[in-house]
Image (cartoon, helix red, strand yellow):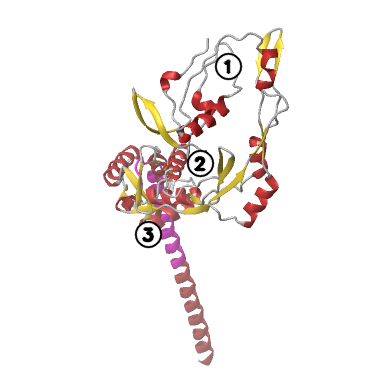
Amino acid sequence: MSDFKISYKNNKQVLDMFRRDNTILIYIILLAVVLGIFIASAFVFYTKHINSDVIQSGIYIKDINISGLTKEEAIKLVKSELDKELNDHLLLRYKNNDYYLAIEQIEAKFNIEDSVEFAYNLARSGNFFSDLHDYISILMSNINIDPILVYNDEELIKYLQTIESNLPDQLEQSSYYIDDDELVITNGKTGAGIELDKLKSEIEIALQDISFSNRYIDIPTFIKYPDKIDVDNIYEEVYREPQDAYYTTDPYAVYSHVIGIDFDKEYLKEEIENNPDNEEYTLELSYIKPNVTNNDLDKEAFPDKLATFSTNYSASNTDRTTNLRLASNKIDGTIVMPGETFSYNKVVGKRTIAAGYKEAPIYENGKVTQGLGRWNMSNIINFI
């Protein structure tokens, strides 16, 4: 009896083990069947998706839903919606001065075609498992695509440079001029320059954000400094060697003398260095008379006297006499060759109080009036 019981227990253990092993096997088979059905279904669905001509669900461009659309339909929809939102210009501002950047001027637009093409190709790489993963991820989370902004960079830079040249704070370079016996140098002034790269970046961001139309961009600037006053360069331009007057007989030609000009450039350099913030620097010029002037040629160059002219004036009017003397000294020795025109204003120069001229009676339109070293235009002489 006891032997039977032992045998029974052993058989029961074997049966339980058999049942447990078969259950695991059944579960494995069922899992394999389910997995096979899922993979087969997924593959059928994937094949259908790959061969479809529409964009999968869950894809947006600029928050515009293009799910289930063909590429042509998506391009048309996105263009239509963006045209409604986009402004035709951007507003740039500097110190209460507004500048309008026309979108059309820089040919700015979104590359919608490439964005739609990218959207269509999502989960269509050709790798089954990778595409399936991407497809499910997009369905669960959605994806919003920002199309690439394209514009004419050359036109944008040209426009920004135009704005820079019209900013209220303009850079002024140093300059100089000669006023009678003086060299006058004006110091340069700092100005504003546009940080082009930074402004371009802000414009790109603004164009990408279609809601930007109601705002403006502050133009970023930096300080532009004028070039240092180049005394050596000024000296090279102003300095002039004196040249003697001379003439030739074959062919006959007279060459007028040239008055030399010089100034103390070392003193000027020191003055600028010691007073860098001065608005203006003034330095007396030295005029160097040549050894032979036009008057020295006289009878040698002009052996034949062609004509003479004289006029009387009242020496009692000292102011008028002063003006006549100053102008005559400038004109004396002037040579006018055949075909040339004598210019009183060019030879005499400015008639100013600083140059020594006085207010005195002059003849104008048949009447006597007060004037400052003026010339009666009826007395102009043309030499033929």
Residue 166 on image: x %, y %: 42, 43
Left or right, 217 with reference to 309: left
Residue 145 on image: x %, y %: 39, 50
Q: Amino acid at mark 1?
A: Val
> Of the numbered discs in the image, which one, if any, rests on residue 141?
3
The Cα atoms of the two marked residues, 1 and 3, are separated by 93 Å
Of residues 217 and 265, the one drawn nearer to the viewer in this rendering: 265
- Report how many numbered discs are placed on residues in the image: 3
Residue 8 on image: x %, y %: 49, 84
In the picture of the structure, the residue carrying the numbered disc 2 is 354
Precedes in sequence: disc 3 or disc 2: 3
Tell us which disc is closer to us: 3 or 2.
Answer: 2
In the picture of the structure, the residue carrying the numbered disc 1 is 336
> Of the numbered discs in the image, which one, if any, rests on residue 25?
none
Cβ atoms at labels 1 and 3 below 8 Å apart: no
Assign a secondary structure to mark 3.
helix
Q: Is residue 34 magenta?
A: yes
The Cα atoms of the two marked residues, 1 and 2, are separated by 28 Å
Q: Amino acid at mark 3?
A: Ser
Q: Quadrant of residue 136?
A: bottom left
Let me know if residue 373 appears in the view: yes
Looking at the rendering, the stretch of residues picked out in magenta corresponds to 27-55
Q: Amino acid at mark 2?
A: Ala
